Amino acid sequence: MTHAPETLEGWYALHQIYRTPNDVLSDAPPQARASATAALAEIACPDEGGWTAVAPLIGSRADVMVIHFRPTLDAIGSAQQRLAAEPLFARSPLVYSFLSIAEAGLYHITARLAKDAQERGGAVGDEAYRAALAQRVEAELATPHLQRRLYPTRPAEMPYVCFYPMSKRRTAADNWYTLSLEERSQLMNAHGLTGRRYAGRVVQVITGAIGLDAWEWGVTLFARDPLDFKKLVTDMRFDEVSARYAEFGEFFVGRLAADGAWPG
């Protein structure tokens, strides 16, 4: 049977990609730089939770990436407006932005519960299904692993960052959304095993964007060694789930700046 997996959501995320023309930096008075630095420091660790980080980009058509995580969409909007009010950011063209929310897809759990429902003559979404799902979700939410996925922290001692959007293909021959839930669960499990080989070397944050952006997911990677970005993405592209069903957007790579530091 084809239906959507259950998902759990955490903090909202916004990735903003700016181009900073040379004349903007050279003509900026010292007070403009100081004001931008103060604004970044102000929103780096907000009282409501979440964080903001800045990464000068390397080898990109843009210059700076700002990453925001917040508990609510309104809080994301406030962070966006705070930067837009700064002259240096107002004069730096926003060349790309990506709105999403930290997500954990419960493929295996959903497939198991759907199979249980079929075996007992019930249906996905019935009372027994929802009760069993609530029990499984409660157990999952109690694990540190899931808490890290839904409420990611800025990884200490991992200064390099890589971000890219992606979607699942919907072509006639390779349509992810026409596969059964069991097939998708098996493919995602194999895909996850590849990622686990990089534990301790790469921290991965998956954010869902269906209904929020043209792309369906965002992937944000943090690492000590940027070469691990290449190795991880290469390995994952040889998984069937990527080789047959994934489309990738533009990649942005940089090094995180100190909290509150103006990157220019």
Image: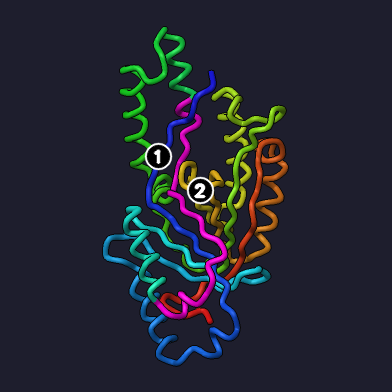
How crowded pointer 1 is (Cα within 10 Å; few <14, some 14-19, many 20+) is rated as some
Within-10-Å neighbours for mark 2: few <14, some 14–19, many 20+? some
Q: Secondary structure at mark 2?
A: loop
Q: Position of residue 157 (x, y in %)?
A: 51, 68
Residue at 65% in and 48% down: 248
- The residue singled out by tag 1 in the image is 8
Vertical relation: 58 (above or below) 107: below
- Most distant residue in the left direction: 47
Which residue appears at 58% of the width and 29% of the height?
Answer: 177
Residue 109, percent across and down?
45, 28
The residues colored magenta run 86-110
In-image side of 238 versus 73 (left or right): right
Q: Report the residue at 66% width, 36% height from top.
A: 245
Q: Is residue 78 above or below residue 125?
A: below
Q: Nearer the viewer, mark 1 or mark 2?
A: 2
Front residue of this view, candidates 250 and 28: 28
Quadrant for residue 32, please give it.
bottom left
Percent across and percent down for residue 200 are 55, 56
Q: Can you identify the residue that label 2 sits on?
A: 213
What type is the residue that disc 1 sits on? Leu
Picture mark count = 2
Magenta stretch holds residue 240: no
